[in-house]
Amino acid sequence: MTWLITGGAGYIGAHVVRAMREAGRPVVVLDELSTGLADRLPADVPLVRGSTLDRALLDRTLARHQVRGVLHLAAKKQVGESVEQPLRYYRENVHGLTVLLEAVVAAGIDRFVFSSSAAVYGMPDVDLVTEDTPCVPMNPYGETKLAGEWLVRATGRAHGLSTACLRYFNVAGAVRPDLADVGVFNIIPMFFDALSRGGAPLIFGDDYPTPDGTCVRDYIHVQDLAEAHVAAARELDARAGEGGDLTVNIGTGHGVSVREMAALVAEITGRTEPAEVRPRRPGDPARVVASAARIGKELGWAPRFGIRDMVASAWEGWCRHRPATVADGHTG
């Protein structure tokens, strides 16, 4: 049985492709390659270049590859950009999902896994964020993910799909250097970029009500995240024809502060430039750490990698993809 993985040439998607194949599940990838890279994929994995907004392409792809399940990862994902371009984010993330679900229903597919985000929670004032914590997203990106969850569940109930919504926390690391995150959007590559240029890593706010005054976040290794997708696919296979929905956090249950992260990055990279503290950024909650109890109970999944593994593997990938930056302090 073939699974369609949308966004499968992206950083997370390529890890999911690899994990699904290792679990013995055939896959086909749909990716418009706006941020994805075709060479992340094994040569024998079919790649269909295109968008979830293209209904005719979706219909052909689902039929040609006899798809029976979908892992939907394709989305626009930058919070700041979503504030500047809300129409684009709603079109790509919500309307694109609508078109995909219409094609899925028409093809009689009954398994659907949706890539959601901890951004649906907004600024939760709790020690551990459970799946029952109120969802109050603070930006259009988070809104589109919450709206996507609603749409997936409603479609599942109406048409007999078994569905799972996976709420990612902070994803980091790489299983191999060639699959590393090459963007400079998340805290670890941002620290790498600053240190490689000879500058200081930036800490936004050191007066939060946390042990060292800096924000605390839950980091999940991308390989653990990929294996959670395999576990979700396996569960939906077992539920095929029964319907039902599942919503779970994907995190570790352990928080790491920004200052702790800066110290670990300095240790692993050997770049010891002291961090520079700047004023808080609007909208940054003090602490966002997942409860991973439900996913353990429902899917038998648990994280295997620690924060040191994440930073070390991310640095190895950074050195491979940006050698000029690492060597001489200039962008490559």
Image (cartoon, rainbow, N blue to C red):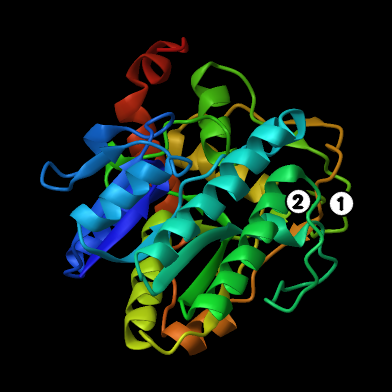
Tell which circle, 2 or 1, labels the residue nearer the N-terminal end.
1
Task: Indicate the position of residue 44 as horizontal and vertical percent values.
Answer: 10, 46
276 up-or-down from 255: above or below: above
Q: Look at 77% across and 45% down and name the residue there.
A: 139
Instruction: Kindly state the secondary structure of the residue where label 2 is placed.
Output: loop
Task: Indicate the position of residue 237 as horizontal and vertical percent values.
Answer: 32, 81
90 up-or-down from 320: above or below: below
**Which image quadrant: the N terminus?**
bottom left
Indicate the amino acid at tag 1: Tyr
Task: Indicate the position of residue 260 as horizontal and vertical percent values.
Answer: 64, 50
Outermost left residue:
44
Indicate the amino acid at tag 2: Cys
**Residue nearest the viewer, comparing 104 with 182:** 104
Q: Look at 67% across and 42% down and name the residue there.
A: 90
Quick check: marks 2 and 1 in contact, CB under 8 Å? yes
129 up-or-down from 219: above or below: below
**Residue nearest the viewer, comparing 49 with 8:** 49
- Could you say which quadrant of the image residue 137 lies in? bottom right
**Which image quadrant: the C terminus?**
top left
Q: Is residue 304 visible?
A: no
- Could you say which quadrant of the image residue 3 lies in? bottom left
Q: How far apart, in angstroms, are the residues tagged by discs 2 and 1?
A: 7 Å
Left or right of 300 in this view: 120: right
Q: Which residue is mark 2?
A: 215
Q: Look at 66% across and 67% down and name the residue there.
A: 150
- Could you say which quadrant of the image residue 274 lies in? top right
Q: Which residue is mark 1?
A: 208
Task: Indicate the position of residue 321 as horizontal and vertical percent values.
Answer: 33, 26
216 up-or-down from 111: above or below: above
Instruction: Kindly state the secondary structure of the residue where label 1 is placed.
Output: loop
Left or right of 8 in this view: 142: right
